[in-house]
Image: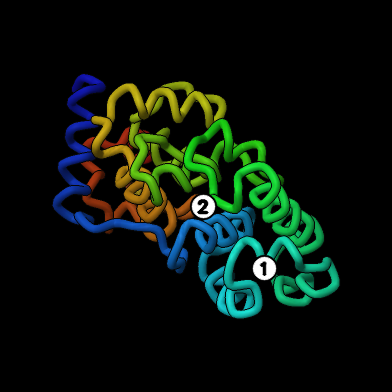
Amino acid sequence: MTRKERFQYVIDYFEQHAPNAETELLYDNPYQLLVAVILSAQCTDKRVNMTTPAIFAQYPDVEALSKATFDDLFPLIRSISYPNNKTKHLIGMANMVMDDFNGEIPSSVPELIKLPGVGRKTANVITSVIYQQPNMAVDTHVFRVSARLGLTVNAKTPLQTEQQLLKYIPEEKVHIAHHWLILHGRYICLARNPKCGECGLRPICKYYKQLVKA
Ligand code: SF4
């Protein structure tokens, strides 16, 4: 099977089984998604979704958040991992959006990564989910699932994974492919005990082939 055929198999599978895959973070606008994605680093989407309604009630837009003090905001995100840093990042992000971007959440990766708490992965999520740009955010699930399926070969870093995936996935499918791989990693292709018995990608999976041989 060529690499191209492998990608086609995976894309066909997910198009059939997960045609409407999307982020599990709850949000109504770019501001809310940016806050949620910053909070989601090293934290589950479920936990973030339990936390954001109170934040958005108190700080309904980026201007309101820019006026928050550390002591006001911290209690609202105390239950999330790294609350100290995330509190500082959210306030810093809101201030920079107000000062440097006229209060509008930027729509390009180079601009987004200037914001505190926003790395390449977060910027790729925002630009693909909100603006449908063909950017692939690589988190631990995307990294692992891509390698196991043989979509990536010897990728050592998230950036290498991103580049290999972008080479083979058609532009218009990149943003949904991100969700396919994340959700597959979250619910089926688990890090420690992948549920291969339930997985429809078994016939082409390199990791499974090794397991069977062993
Ligand atoms: S067969 Fe197993 S290792 Fe391969 S993608 Fe499916 S769950 Fe993951």
Left or right: where 99 falls relative to 33: right
Look at the image and tell me in which quarter the N terminus lies.
Answer: top left
Look at the image and tell me in which quarter the C terminus lies.
Answer: top left
- Residue 43 in percent (x, y) is at 61, 61
Residue 64: mark in rendering: 1
Residue at 61 percent across and 75 percent down: it is 51
Helix, strand or loop under label 1: helix
Instruction: Decide which of 57, 16 is in the foreground and name it.
Output: 57
Vertically, is 193 above or below 168?
below
Q: Residues within 10 Å of mark 1 (few under 14, many from 20)?
A: some
- Residue 85 in percent (x, y) is at 78, 55
Residue at the front extreme, as displayed? 102
**Pointer 1 with pointer 2, Cβ within 8 A:** no
Vertically, is 65 above or below 177?
below
Q: Which residue is mark 2?
A: 192
Residue type highlighted by circle 2: Arg
Q: Which of the 4 image quarters holds residue 35?
A: bottom right
Q: How far apart in space, not on screen, are marks 1 and 2 (Cα)?
A: 42 Å
Vertically, is 85 above or below 162?
below
- Residue 114 in percent (x, y) is at 66, 37
Residue at 72 percent across and 53 percent down: it is 95
Instruction: Decide which of 15, 189 is in the foreground and name it.
Output: 15
Residue at 75 percent across and 65 percent down: it is 67
Residue type highlighted by circle 1: Ala
